[in-house]
Amino acid sequence: MKAVLLILLALAGCASQPAPPPGTQAPLARLTEGVVPGRTTRAELLAAFGPTKSVRFDSGYEAWVYQSPAGGGRYAEFVVLLNPQGVVAKTRTRAPALP
């Protein structure tokens, strides 16, 4: 009986936590301070934040998306555009969706 109760409590704890979206997560302040357009390279992004969701375009550009926890099961997105030479061209922050 105790084993069943413990399993149910464990499952209830898991069910109450929303699953994070796929992709690498990092604090937004660390992302905005650590990624500098025109200077930060692909290798530096990988070393500092790890691999994440990305899209490679025929033009050679790549868009990488990092997630940043914003509380309440919500996440902001930090989008990085890499040029064909592997240097950050632009960044953009998208606020978390409203509940």
Image (cartoon, rainbow, N blue to C red):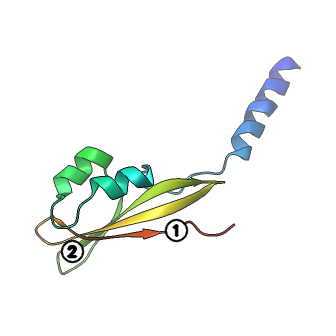
Residue 50 x/y as whole percent: 31, 48
Q: Earlier in the sequence, mark 1 or mark 2?
A: 2
Q: In whole angstroms, how far apart are the C-alphas of marks 1 and 2?
A: 23 Å
Q: Which mark is residue 61?
A: 2
**Residue found at the very far bottom of the displayed protein:** 59
Quarter location, residue 57: bottom left
Classify mark 1: residues with Cα within 10 Å, few (<14), some (14-19) or many (20+): few
Question: Which marked residue is nearer to the observer: mark 1 or mark 2?
Answer: 1
Q: Is residue 23 above or below residue 4?
A: below
Between 4 and 91, the one lying in front of the other is 91
- Badge 2 element: loop
Q: Position of residue 51 (x, y in %)?
A: 31, 52
Amino acid carrying label 2: it is: Tyr
Give whichever of 60, 32 is nearer the camera. Answer: 32
Residue receiving disc 1: 95
Q: Would residue 59 appear left or right of 33 to someone viewing this image? A: left
Instruction: Please tell me whether mark 1 sits on a helix, a strand or a loop.
Output: loop
Which amino acid, mark 1?
Ala
Vertical order, 1 against 77 (above or below): above
Q: Nearer the viewer, residue 6 or 21?
A: 21
Task: Confirm or deny contact between disc 1 and disc 2 (CB under 8 A).
Answer: no
Give the residue drawn at x 89%, y 20%. Answer: 1
- Taking 62 as reference, is 41 left or right? left
